[in-house]
Each structure stands twice: as structure tokens, then as C-alpha cells.
């Protein structure tokens, strides 16, 4: 498992809010208890890249979740541009050409690339509908192997696959798990979910949590409860 010096870094809160203003309000509500934020489609397309720079300047860690996927050359050039933002993580889809392009673009910068294996909203039936002949666990395993060969830094998967992924990637790559649901919270569109405590016990390095925190009546208390679970299970 990766060495994480500050246990707070194990929780990544997804800033899936409509505006930079909403994001700032949330970051200020959550305060020092949350050190790591994810910026995805919603904010990235609404001023989120400048926000990423700003959060980094304020000492927060940022996971830029752009899930890049294109021909290798285009991915390489896009990743090269993104190395200048100072963010910690960037996602690409775990297709071999895409991952190789991304690794070239990352070069020896500090940016860490995460490969998204099988989205946590997918089950075996959804993969079949998308034209795949593999079950979720087999696809995750294959993509984790390909990510390791390509020189990717970490894997995004459901916490339920942490065991098989760790077996494939060894101790040095990081495992980041969305689809986290504290007990009693609504799954929404997520199909492969685990609780924060289960995810940590099974060996996930970082947990991504969005709606259970950002849509809670009291986001600070919700984040605190997730963090308490993480600390107790660590
Ligand atoms: O790459 C991701 O972060 C990601 C991969 C995945 O397989 N599943 C997944 O839910 N995510 C992201 O993780 C976050 C989960 O949010 P909630 O379902 O609201 O907790 C969203 O921002 C998703 O875009």
C-alpha cells in the first residue's frame, strides 16, 4: 500500500457543483478537515481549471477528473498542458494507446496518472450492453495489468475490486475508489458500492465521495463522519 502521511488525504471530496462560487462555499464549509478535492466535468467546464490552480495555491490537493480518451498523440499533448496546473491526480480511460500517450505527456512531472478501469455505475450487464465480452472483475484485472505495463501511477476501480487490483499492480501504485456509500445513504446511479470502512479495510488508498457529502444537509458533519470511519478502519 502507498504511504499516505496525512490520513485526511485519504478522503477526496468530489466538487460536483455547478459553479466555482458553489465550490468555494463548500471548500470553506468543509474547512481544514478536507485536504483533497476532485474537479470533474461539471466544474472543469465552468471555470474549474482556474479553481484547480487556486486550490493548489491555497495548499489543497486536487484530483482533476477529466477521464481523457483520444488518439495517443492528442492525449499526450493534452496531458503535457495539464502538467502545468500543479494538480496531484489526473484520470484517463484505461485503453492501452490512451495510457501510453498520457504517460509520454506526463514525462517526469509530478502529476500522477490514474487509469479508470470499469466505471462504478457499471455491472456485467452494462458492460455487455456496451459491447464488452468480459465481466467487470475480468475487465478490471485486464486493465490494471495494462495500466501497470504502460507506466500509469494508479487505478480507479470500485473498492470491491481492490484485492484483485492490488494483486496485479503490486505495492507501489495507488488505488482510488469512488462509489463509496456510508451505510444508509442512497446509491443513486452507483452499482458497485462499499462503505468507507469496508473500502479502507480492504486496502483502498483514497476514497472519492461526492453526493453523500456535498448534498448532505450538513456537509461538514457528513465529511467528519466519513473521516471518523476512515480513521477507525485505518
Ligand atoms: O473517476 C472517477 O472519479 C469516477 C470513476 C468511477 O468509476 N465512478 C465514479 O463515480 N467516479 C466519480 O466519482 C464521483 C462519485 O460521486 P458520488 O457518486 O456522488 O459519490 C463522481 O464525481 C464520479 O464522476
Image: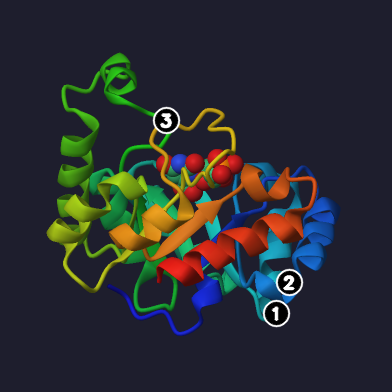
Q: Is residue 138 left or right of residue 162?
A: left
Q: CA distance from mark 3 to mark 2?
A: 34 Å
Q: Position of residue 67 (x, y in %)?
A: 46, 46
Question: Depth check: 187 or 41 in front?
Answer: 187
In contact (CB < 8 Å): disc 1 and disc 3: no
Residue 146: numbered disc: none
Q: How is the image coloured?
A: rainbow
Q: Position of residue 154 (x, y in %)?
A: 32, 62
Label 3 sits on residue: 191
Image position of 230 with respect to 99: above or below: below
Q: Nearer the viewer, mark 3 or mark 2?
A: 3
Image position of 199 with respect to 7: above or below: above
Q: CA distance from mark 1 to mark 2?
A: 5 Å
Q: Secondary structure at mark 3?
A: loop
Q: Position of residue 204 (x, y in %)?
A: 35, 60
Q: Is residue 214 visible?
A: yes
Question: Depth check: 80 or 87 in front?
Answer: 87
Q: Residue at x 29, y 23 (%)?
A: 127
Corner quadrant of residue 125 = top left
Q: Is residue 9 left or right of residue 170?
A: right
Q: Secondary structure at mark 2?
A: helix
Mark 3 and mark 2 lie on one chain; the one further toward the N terminus is: 2
Image position of 186 with respect to 46: above or below: above
Mark 1 and mark 3 lie on one chain; the one further toward the N terminus is: 1
Q: Residue furthest top?
A: 129
Q: Position of residue 60 (x, y in %)?
A: 64, 75
Label 1 sits on residue: 57
Q: Secondary structure at mark 1?
A: helix
Label 2 sits on residue: 54
In contact (CB < 8 Å): disc 1 and disc 2: yes
Q: Residue at x 67, y 52 (%)?
A: 15
Q: Residues within 10 Å of mark 3 (few under 14, many from 20)?
A: some
Amino acid at each position: 500500500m502507498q504511504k499516505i502521511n496525512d490520513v485526511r488525504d485519504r478522503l477526496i471530496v468530489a466538487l460536483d457543483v455547478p459553479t466555482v462560487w458553489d465550490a468555494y462555499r463548500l471548500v470553506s464549509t468543509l474547512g481544514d478537515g478536507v485536504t483533497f478535492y476532485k474537479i470533474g466535468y461539471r466544474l472543469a467546464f465552468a471555470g474549474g481549471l482556474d479553481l484547480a490552480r487556486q486550490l493548489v495555491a491555497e495548499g489543497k490537493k486536487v484530483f482533476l477528473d477529466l477521464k481523457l480518451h483520444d488518439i495517443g498523440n492528442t492525449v499526450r499533448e493534452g496531458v503535457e498542458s495539464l502538467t502545468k496546473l500543479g494538480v496531484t491526480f489526473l484520470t484517463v480511460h484505461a485503453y492501452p494507446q490512451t495510457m501510453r500517450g498520457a504517460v509520454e505527456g506526463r514525462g517526469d512531472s509530478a502529476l500522477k496518472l490514474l487509469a479508470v478501469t470499469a466505471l462504478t455505475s457499471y455491472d456485467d450487464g452494462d458492460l455487455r450492453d456496451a459491447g464488452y465480452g468480459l465481466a467487470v472483475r475480468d475487465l478490471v484485472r485486464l486493465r490494471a495489468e495494462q495500466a501497470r505495463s504502460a507506466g500509469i501511477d494508479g487505478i480507479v476501480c470500485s473498492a470491491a475490486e481492490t484485492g484483485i487490483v492490488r494483486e496485479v499492480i503490486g505495492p507501489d501504485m495507488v488505488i482510488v475508489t469512488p462509489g463509496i456509500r456510508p451505510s444508509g445513504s442512497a446509491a443513486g446511479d452507483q452499482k458497485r458500492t462499499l462503505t468507507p470502512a469496508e473500502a479502507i479495510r480492504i486496502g483502498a488508498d483514497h476514497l472519492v465521495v461526492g453526493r453523500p457529502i456535498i448534498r448532505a444537509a450538513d456537509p461538514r458533519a457528513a465529511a467528519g463522519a466519513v473521516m471518523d470511519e476512515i480513521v477507525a478502519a485505518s
